[in-house]
Structures are given as structure tokens and as C-alpha cells.
């Protein structure tokens, strides 16, 4: 059980750190991420790009350490559910289809829920501190807090417009190219 929790935490946490790092420092950096968020209807793009980046880096780091594991898992669930709804769901399941489907974000979401249910495991800072919320309670925190946060973001800040063509979504008004970052 400890090795399963550790492997899941490292895989999902490391992936989220890489994802957040890319938002901040890869491709178009934070301004490019903000433009991409705006292009898929998440406004204001700069605020949400920064919030998503901080959440991904923070939740990823907490998962790697096994610290506040159900809450860290909730951060992953929240960011991935927003990505799933705002960008990926309309493109079908498979990620290799045009527009990138939702298989990746769905798997990350479900893995984060599993981490919430498992807890940090014996090889975690949660265990060293005597903090444990495994099973149904950990799953509920990860799934409900994460989905609740995602719903809040989507209801208050997502205003999808008409579908932009790939060419118009990838070249903003300032002429700099923007890569998909969600």
C-alpha cells in the first residue's frame, strides 16, 4: 500500500509540477498562458493563469511530499476538471485527435481521487505528522472540494464564445505565437 501511494503521489505530483512550470516558464510563459485562457473563455486570463499555475505547482509539491494529501489531490482535481470542461470535453475522448480529447485530464483527475482515498501512505510527511484522512473521507475531500472549486471557477469565470479556428487561437493580436497549455 505504501509503495502504491508513493508511486501515485510522485507520478501525479511530478506531472502537476511540470504542468505548472510549463504554464509559468514554457512556451508563451505566463502571458501566453493568460492569452490561451482568454481564448477558451476563462476570464480574466491573467488572474486564472496565475491561479492555475500556483495551484498546480503547490498541489504537485504537496503530493510529492505527501503533505495534506487530500487537499493537494483536491487542487489537482479542480484544475483538471476546469481543463476538461473548458477545453477538452468537446474534442472527444482520445488526446491524439485534433483539439486534444479528455483522456489525459480524466486520468489525472481519477488518479488524484485515488490518491485522496489512499492518503499519503506510510512514506509521507502526513504519516510523519500523524495526519491521516484515508478512505471515503479522503476521497470526498479530493473529489468534492476539487469539483466544487472547479464549478465555482466555471460558473463565475468561464464564458465560452464561438469556437475559434486553430489558426486564430494560436496567433494573438500581438503576433506572438501561443501554444496550448491546458
Image (cartoon, rainbow, N blue to C red):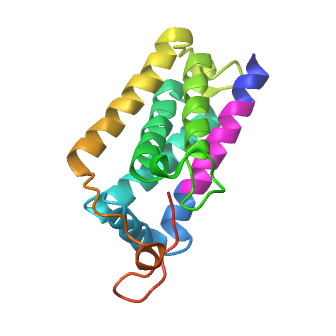
List x then y, in percent, for residue 107.
61, 37
In the image: residue 123, left or right of residue 115:
right
Please, is residue 155 above or below residue 117 in the view? below
Q: Which residue lies furthest to the bottom in this view?
A: 175
Does residue 10 show up magenta in the picture? yes
Give the overall secondary structure of the magenta segment.
Answer: helix
Question: For this view, does 45 lie left or right of residue 139?
Answer: left
83 displayed left or right of 149? right
Q: Quadrant of residue 102?
A: top right
Q: In this view, does 84 lie above or below 49?
A: above
Q: Is residue 9 left or right of residue 41?
A: right
Residue at the image point whose x is 49% and y is 65% from the top: 24
Q: Residue furthest right?
A: 3
Q: Position of residue 14 (x, y in %)?
A: 65, 46
Please state, as top left, top right, bottom left or bottom right, where the N terminus lies in the image.
Answer: top right
Residue 102 inside the magenta-drawn segment:
no
Query: In the image as oriented, which residue stretches furthest toward the left?
Result: 156
Amino acid at each position: 500500500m505504501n509503495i502504491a501511494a508513493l508511486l501515485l503521489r510522485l507520478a501525479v505530483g511530478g506531472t502537476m509540477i511540470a504542468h505548472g512550470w510549463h504554464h509559468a516558464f514554457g512556451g508563451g510563459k505566463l502571458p501566453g498562458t493568460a492569452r490561451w485562457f482568454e481564448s477558451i473563455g476563462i476570464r480574466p486570463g491573467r488572474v486564472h493563469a496565475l491561479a492555475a499555475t500556483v495551484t498546480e505547482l503547490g498541489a504537485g509539491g504537496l503530493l510529492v511530499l505527501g503533505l495534506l494529501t487530500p487537499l493537494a489531490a483536491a487542487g489537482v482535481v479542480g484544475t483538471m476538471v476546469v481543463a476538461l470542461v473548458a477545453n477538452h470535453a468537446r474534442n472527444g475522448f482520445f488526446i491524439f485527435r485534433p483539439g486534444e480529447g479528455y483522456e489525459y485530464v480524466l486520468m489525472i483527475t481519477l488518479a488524484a481521487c485515488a490518491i485522496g482515498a489512499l492518503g499519503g501512505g506510510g512514506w509521507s510527511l502526513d504519516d510523519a505528522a500523524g495526519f491521516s484522512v484515508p478512505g471515503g473521507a479522503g476521497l470526498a475531500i479530493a473529489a468534492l472540494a476539487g469539483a466544487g472549486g472547479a464549478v465555482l471557477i466555471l460558473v463565475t469565470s468561464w464564458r465560452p464564445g464561438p469556437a475559434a479556428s486553430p489558426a486564430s487561437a494560436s496567433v494573438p493580436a500581438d503576433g506572438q505565437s501561443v501554444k496550448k497549455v491546458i
